[in-house]
Image (cartoon, rainbow, N blue to C red):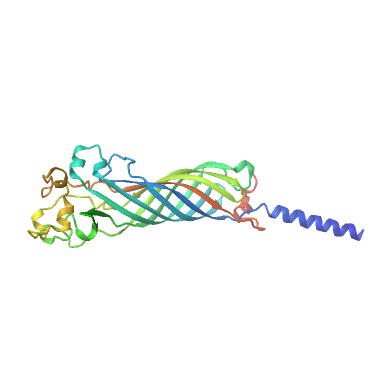
């Protein structure tokens, strides 16, 4: 009898341990890889002719099987060139830029269907996402074989106080608001994959260093033998037609809009086994 009790106790403990191993932490860590595309004054028609790699790391917290929140660190590279435009004026304007982007964001995800890793009936769901973040950018271009950061040059007369400038340029930092949608699928218990596409609405119109109007060329410091970089890069139309389009006050960009960048990435993330039932399952979400 005593031996039977011992065997039953061992079997009971084994069953409890086996059941406990079906739980996974409410947190997961993951990596993202994909691409990005800038939209703004040099790409007003939302062309996809300058897609560049994007990648990042994230931590996701499940509050319940329908809602989760995510902290993301992302890097990408954006740019565009008027030469890629189908618009005749843009081709004549002949501006271009590139910039590295470093972003940190917080996003909420709202699943259409119940999602819980390891649960066969909760294996896949589409979702929508929205959030807030901040990012660093620093537009630059190449001229005569040399790289120039555009912000310190003040190509729209930001440093020309006598020409109406404020004496300071725009910031290298801005806020962004990711808005998008995606899908999730658990490949095996604890391993989740997905795809997301989200547009970053920003508060800056200077990701591309183009926003307002041309300024008088005479206001830039000039040397008969050496053209200043600011003067050369505020109006590059002369490189195309030998005739400069820029006149004081003429529109150079569209200050009524703000720049954006779209990010589309594939995700893979990992949740780890735990012997403790996640709190949101204790709150009544374990059963249908």
The answer to whether residue 288 of the structure is visible from this angle is no
The image position of residue 132, as x and y in percent, is: 40, 53
The image position of residue 150, as x and y in percent, is: 23, 57
The image position of residue 16, as x and y in percent, is: 74, 55
Position of 124 relative to 170 (above/below) = above
Residue sitting at the far right: 1
Whether residue 95 sits left or right of residue 174 in the image: it is: left
Residue plotted at (50% across, 48% down): 267
Q: Quadrant of the C terminus?
A: top right
Residue sitting at the far front: 145
Q: Quadrant of residue 84?
A: top left
Residue plotted at (26% across, 51% down): 97
Whether residue 241 sits left or right of residue 40 in the image: it is: left
Q: Nearer the viewer, residue 8 or 146?
A: 146
Whether residue 186 sits left or right of residue 105 in the image: it is: right
Count all numbered tags in the image, as a single digit. 0
The answer to whether residue 85 of the structure is visible from this angle is yes
The image position of residue 18, as x and y in percent, is: 72, 53
Q: Quadrant of the N terminus?
A: bottom right
Whether residue 194 sits left or right of residue 174 in the image: it is: right
């Amino acid at each position: 009898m005593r031996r039977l009790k011992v065997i039953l106790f061992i079997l009971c403990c084994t069953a409890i341990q086996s059941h406990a191993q079906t739980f996974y932490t409410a947190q997961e860590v993951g990596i993202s890889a994909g691409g990005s595309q800038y939209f703004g004054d040099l790409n007003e028609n939302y062309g996809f002719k300058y897609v560049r790699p994007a990648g990042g790391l994230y931590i996701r917290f499940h509050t319940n099987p329908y809602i989760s929140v995510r902290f993301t660190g992302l890097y990408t590279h954006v740019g565009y060139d008027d030469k890629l435009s189908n618009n005749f004026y843009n081709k004549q304007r002949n501006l271009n830029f590139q910039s590295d982007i470093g972003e940190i964001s917080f996003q909420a995800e709202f699943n259409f269907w119940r999602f819980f890793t390891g649960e066969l009936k909760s294996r896949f769901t589409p979702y929508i996402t929205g959030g807030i973040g901040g990012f660093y950018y620093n537009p630059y271009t190449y001229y005569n074989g040399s790289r120039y950061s555009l912000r310190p040059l003040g190509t729209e007369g930001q440093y020309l106080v006598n020409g109406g400038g404020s004496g300071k340029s725009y910031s290298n930092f801005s806020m962004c608001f990711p808005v998008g949608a995606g899908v999730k699928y658990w490949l095996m218990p604890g391993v989740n994959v997905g795809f997301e596409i989200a547009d970053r609405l920003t508060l800056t119109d200077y990701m591309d260093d183009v926003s307002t109007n041309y300024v008088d060329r005479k206001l830039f410091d000039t040397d008969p033998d050496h053209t200043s970089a600011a003067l050369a890069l505020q109006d590059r139309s002369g490189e195309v037609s030998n005739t400069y389009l820029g006149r004081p006050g003429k529109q150079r960009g569209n200050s009524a809009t703000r720049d954006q960048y779209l990010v589309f990435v594939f995700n893979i993330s990992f949740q780890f086994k735990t012997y403790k039932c996640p709190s949101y399952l204790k709150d009544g979400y374990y059963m249908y």
